[in-house]
Image (cartoon, helix red, strand yellow):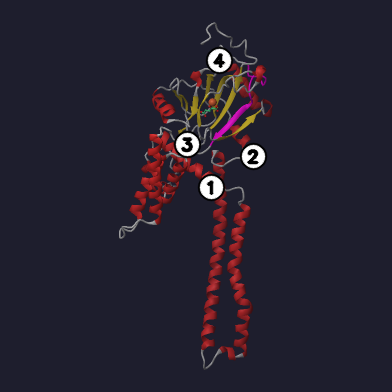
Amino acid sequence: MYSKSHVEALYRSAMRKKMDVVTVFVSLSWLLLWLCPLKVSSEMYSSMSRLEKLVAVEEKLVEMSKEFLKEEKHRLQSLESFVETAEQQLQMSMNKSMSLVHHPVGAYLLVKRLSSDWLQQVKSVYQPLTDYVNRYNSEYHGQLPTAEDAHWSAHAILRLQEVYQLDIRNIISGQMELGLKTNDNVSASAEQNALRLKRGDVFEIAKGAYRNNDYSSAIKWLNESLQMMEEEEEPVKNKETPAEGDALQYLGYSLYKMFRSRIGNSISEVESHIRISQQAWLHDKDDEVVARVSRRIGLFTGLNTSPTSTELLQVLNYGLGGQYEPHHDYMTAEEKMWGTILGNRMATFLLYLNGVTAGGATVFPVVNVTVPVVKNAGLLFMDLLRSGRGDENSLHAGCPVVIGSKWIANKWIHEGGNEFRRKCGLNPNE
Ligand SMILES: O=C(O)CCC(=O)C(=O)O
Ligand SMILES: [Fe+2]
């Protein structure tokens, strides 16, 4: 879990002291296109590009539903006029002195209505409904996010609120001011309305925090949801509604659990979502541009970046609230992943393939440095000391993306083949 005390405090102070970013202008936007047809098997929330595809899915759903509603209106109108006619005939049939049933045509019409017309009418209502449901189930199968996606999307809001200390009220009222460019065709207030959270959403987010054992966030969101319920309810009654009862129950449990965790000094075991992203690995031989990127990194760093000294180019897209918790890129002796020929990761070259509107900086908590996401910029840092020991100062994290889609590419340069390019020094601590 990323702890507030660790990264966040350092992140804040680091904001003041920005590192010089080594900027390498490389045109990598094609990589994004290249990645599009890639099949990714895991969740939707973990990649912004997958989330973007949902817009098209909902567009199709709206179209299908509008079509259904249009036809349904016609059908209901025709059902209405059928029922009206039947009612008129029925009234005439109930007339004791001159019942329509006694007339051969009247009798025929009654029998026909009851033997087939009613059935047809009932079917005409039932069939399109089942078609609508079936189409929803078959055409959209696998394209829709799951309850787990919804859970983690809510979790992203919690994380962003906590890391950046956002005002919960502003989030709820759709006023999360993060420099999101207002769409020219949509007024600011309409956009704010569209981003407003309903009390049910607020309660869901609170429950998500509770499920993650994040009781202090749960309490904050539950209080907000209770307040919203109070404001929205009719002022007549003093009794709590079922929803309020639920929220109060959660609040009680949260308060109790937070109290207990403090007493026992067992800080809540929040499920750690170390990295939220989708990734792909590109070979130099996949395309001349990939090979060119490797060559340029070699020229820039003076290190050997041939395929025998590096890993493939890793391209990744972060998801909603996507982040990467503090870590080292090098492996420890126990982890030993690459064998003696390739050796450990010696240097990381990180390319920012696009800019984001808010959040997403790479932070180095030990040395107190923050590197903002700048499109086409490259960041180089050494993972190992000259002695080959892991450099503790290289501890770094990708901060949660608040708004935007963060695409990066990593090139890891290894020790193997670089023995004479970056030689050992005399001081083992260097
Ligand atoms: O996204 C970032 O800023 C950091 C990424 C990173 O550390 C990694 O991929 O190893
Ligand atoms: Fe890293």
Q: Residues within 10 Å of mark 1 (few under 14, many from 20)?
A: few
Which region shows up in magenta?
Answer: 304-318
Which is in the foreground here, disc 1 or disc 2? 1
Between disc 3 and disc 2, the foreground one is: 3
Task: Please identify the quarter of the rendering in which residue 368 is found.
Answer: top left
Q: Element under label 2?
A: loop
Residue 171: x percent and y percent?
40, 42
Q: Which residue is mark 3?
A: 270
First along the sequence among labels 3 and 2: 2
User: Which of the two residues, 274 or 261, is positioned nearer the viewer here?
Assistant: 261
Q: Which residue is mark 1?
A: 147
Q: Which circle marks residue 39 in the picture?
A: 2
Closest to the observer, 146 or 240: 240
Residue 45 percent across, percent down from the top left: 54, 41
The crowd level at tag 2 (other Cα within 10 Å; few <14, some 14-19, many 20+) is few
Q: Residue furthest right?
A: 285
Magenta stretch contains residue 312? yes
Query: Which residue is under mark 4?
Result: 389
